[in-house]
Amino acid sequence: MAKKEIMIYGEDKIPCFNITFSVGIGGQNEKGDVMLIQAMFNFIALGNFPRLGLKSKSDLPALTGSLHSDTIFAIITF
C-alpha cells in the first residue's frame, strides 16, 4: 500500500510518498502502489514530457490503479 512518509534530508524533514511493493512486469502491482506511480508520472510530466522520455500527454498513464500497457510503457521509457 502506498503511504506518506517523512524523509530526513540533512536537517530538514520533507514529506514524501513511497510504495510498498514493486510496480511493473513481474511486480506485485498493488493498486495503491500502481496508482502512486501513475500519479507521479503525471506530476513529473507537467509541461516537461522529455524529462520522462515521453513525447506527449497521450503517453502518460491513466490514474486507474491497474497496471496496463500505458503504465508499463512509461516505466520502461523512464
Image (cartoon, rainbow, N blue to C red):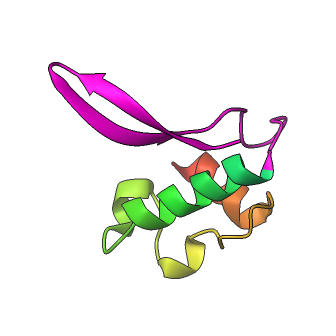
The stretch in magenta equals 1-30
How many numbered discs?
A: 0
Q: Where is residue 19 in the image (x, y as percent from the top left)?
A: 62, 38
Q: In which quarter of the image is residue 6?
A: top left
In the current view of this chain or complex, which residue is farthest to the left? 11
Up-down relation of residue 53 to residue 27 (above or below): below
Q: Position of residue 20 (x, y in %)?
A: 67, 32
Identify the residue at image location x=71%, y=34%: 22
Residue 24 appears left or right of 3:
right
Q: Position of residue 29 (x, y in %)?
A: 80, 44
The reply to whether the magenta stretch includes residue 14 is yes
Q: Quadrant of residue 12?
A: top left
Residue 72 appears left or right of 50:
right
Residue 62 appears left or right of 13:
right
Up-down relation of residue 66 to residue 19 (above or below): below
In the current view of this chain or complex, which residue is farthest to the top? 10
Residue 67 appears left or right of 39:
right
Q: Where is residue 39 in the image (x, y as percent from the top left)?
A: 54, 62
Identify the residue at image location x=58%, y=72%: 59
